[in-house]
Amino acid sequence: MNAEPAGTPTKKTAPWKIIIPIAIVLILCCLCAVTAGVLYYLGTQGSGPFASLEGSPLLTPSVVGEWDLYYDWYCSGDYDGPITAIFLQDGSYQTYEIEGGDRSYGAWTLSAGTLDIYYDGYPNAHYTGTLSGSTHVEGTMTTDSDLSGCWYADKR
């Protein structure tokens, strides 16, 4: 038999040898998570170090590409279109009627989810819309001659 001789101390497991390393790992994980959360919050507020990333192509959905645009100059619910709107990476765009219409040109900007489109020529329209996700935008439009309306567009 494998009996221990009399007077030999018996081995006891020390629970602290397991509990203490686990506790240290848990505490370090919690500290890292809290630190990352605080840095993210502070970094994106006001003039924080990450606030300058707003508008970055890495964080902002892109409108670059082809869209189907519908417009209604009196917001009556009777939309015309679609017209094809092509937004280029350089901030310019062009539109044309799908059924052989003239081309129009202009510039666009996207800031904090608001898309602004400026036509170069008549009727000097300014379209402002709110981007929903990265495939839908809707808003209002105005001209220099006080004409106004509603519009929306869906990315192809």
Image (cartoon, rainbow, N blue to C red):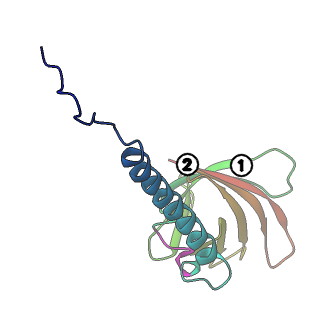
In the shown orientation, is residue 3 left or right of residue 132?
Answer: left
Q: Start and end of the magenta stretch?
A: 52-57
Residue kind at label 1, given as amino acid type? Asp
* Observer-nearest of 51 and 114: 51
In the shown orientation, is residue 32 left or right of residue 72?
Answer: left
Quarter of the image holding residue 149? Answer: bottom right
Estimate the x, y position of residue 92 in percent, counting from the top left.
Answer: 51, 75
Residue reaching furthest to the bottom:
47
Residue reaching furthest to the top:
1
In the shown orientation, is residue 37 left or right of residue 13?
Answer: right
Decide: few, some or many residues near mark 1? Use Cα within 10 Å; few <14, some 14-19, many ≥20. few
In the shown orientation, is residue 9 left or right of residue 23?
Answer: left
Estimate the x, y position of residue 25 in percent, counting from the top left.
Answer: 42, 55
Estimate the x, y position of residue 12 in percent, counting from the top left.
Answer: 33, 36
Say if the magenta span includes residue 53: yes
Residue reaching furthest to the left:
1
Q: Disc count in the image?
A: 2
* Residue ID for mark 2: 99
* Observer-nearest of 25 and 127: 25
Q: Secondary structure at mark 2?
A: loop
Q: Earlier in the sequence, mark 1 or mark 2?
A: 1
* Residue ID for mark 1: 80
Residue 23, disc: none
In the depicted structure, whether residue 27 falls above or below residue 79: below
Which SS type dominates the magenta stretch?
A: loop
Say if the magenta span includes residue 55: yes
